[in-house]
Image: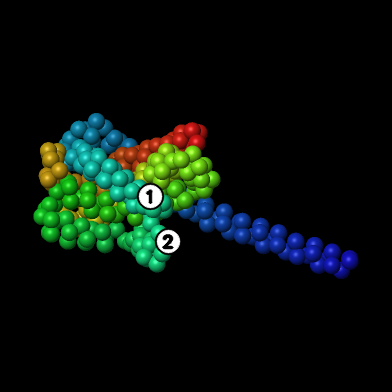
């Protein structure tokens, strides 16, 4: 018995040493990423804090750094989100409900599910090429706000579908059975039991997908979103620009003043992203309390 006890103690001690070494390695790797991020954020804040003036939000882009602002880029981003949000929510959540609640589990649905999961990892530039081909050229929407919103909707749809499916799948089967036992139809069960129980996860996925969309540049560059727009779009068919493209335009200029403007634009974009992520957390916590 003593031999076996000694062997067990040695194995336990060995596992603890390995666990300690791995913990230190993971902590070291995490620290490098966090320190690099903090250094980058500190550099951006130091460069752009002085440019966070009302003129940044009230002025249009200009070739003079002292007069330049990002009003058209901020408004263009908000307009694009206003078109994307209802489209992506209805299409994405509708597709998730169909695949989880109505579609038969056969080979075809497995292929569709595999394709959706694959599309969620496709590089964003591919969606830009697709949007250029379909919306700009085939549908003749030109380089408009509408074509940009449609392209970004294609980008976020797979993410929303996958996250909505996971949220719907997490609803216990007992809730569906209880609803059916009370005489509810399939749609009544989905609308009054499944969706209220999964809405927190669905909204979290939608908001995080929107957060990704407002930080994307490649698809909008492909469809020709302009970098210098000194007006606000009056209709969905007008030309537009968004915050990442305006920031990229300023970064590409050699003057230090434009570099500071770009840093200020990055701060505004980060604040918007943090606000959206905070909203996702608040909505999730709110609806979880009511379940």
Q: What kind of element bears circle 2? A: loop
Question: Where is residue 235, by image quadrant?
Answer: top left
- Which residue is pictured at 40% across the width and 59% down the height? 104
For mark 1, what is the residue?
97
Query: What colour scheme has been applied to the protein in the rendered image?
Result: rainbow
CA–CA distance between discs 1 and 2? Answer: 13 Å
- Which residue is pictured at 46% across the width and 35% down the height? 287
- Which residue is pictured at 50% across the width and 33% down the height? 289
Instruction: Looking at the picture, tell me which residue is in the foreground, 45 or 160.
Output: 160
Residue 243 is situated, as x and y percent measured from the top left of the image, at 25, 45
Instruction: Looking at the picture, tell me which residue is in the foreground, 109 or 61.
Output: 109
For mark 2, what is the residue?
105
Determine contact: label 1, label 2, CB under 8 Å. no
Residue 278 is situated, as x and y percent measured from the top left of the image, at 41, 38
Please state if 223 lies on the left or on the right of 155 as rendered: left
- For label 1, count other residues whose C-alpha is less than 10 Å away and answer few (under 14), some (14-19) or many (20+): many
């Amino acid at each position: 018995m003593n031999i076996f006890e000694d062997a067990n103690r040695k194995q336990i001690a060995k596992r603890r040493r390995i666990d300690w070494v791995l913990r230190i390695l993971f902590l070291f790797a995490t620290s490098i990423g966090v320190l690099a991020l903090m250094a980058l954020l500190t550099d951006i804040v130091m460069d752009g804090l002085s440019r966070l003036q009302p003129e940044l939000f009230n002025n249009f882009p200009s070739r003079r750094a002292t007069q330049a602002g990002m009003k058209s880029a901020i408004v263009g981003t908000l307009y694009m989100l206003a078109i994307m949000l209802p489209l992506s929510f209805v299409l994405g959540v509708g597709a998730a409900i169909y695949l989880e609640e109505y579609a038969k589990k056969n080979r075809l649905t497995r292929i569709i599910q595999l394709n959706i999961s694959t599309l969620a990892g496709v590089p964003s530039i591919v969606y830009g090429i697709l949007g250029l081909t379909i919306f700009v050229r085939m549908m003749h929407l030109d380089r408009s706000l509408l074509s940009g919103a449609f392209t970004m909707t294609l980008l976020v749809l797979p993410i929303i579908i996958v996250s909505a499916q996971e949220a719907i799948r997490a609803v216990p089967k007992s809730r569906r059975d209880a609803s059916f036992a009370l005489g509810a139809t399939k749609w009544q069960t989905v609308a009054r039991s499944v969706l209220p129980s999964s809405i927190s996860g669905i909204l979290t996925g939608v908001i995080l997908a929107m957060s990704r969309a407002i930080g994307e540049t490649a698809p909008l560059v492909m469809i020709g979103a302009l970098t210098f727009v000194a007006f606000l779009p009056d209709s969905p068919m007008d030309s537009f620009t968004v915050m990442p493209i305006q920031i990229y335009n300023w970064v590409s200029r050699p003057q230090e003043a434009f570099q500071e403007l770009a840093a200020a634009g990055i701060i505004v974009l980060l604040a918007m992203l943090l606000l959206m992520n905070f909203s996702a957390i608040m909505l999730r916590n709110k609806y979880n309390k009511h379940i």
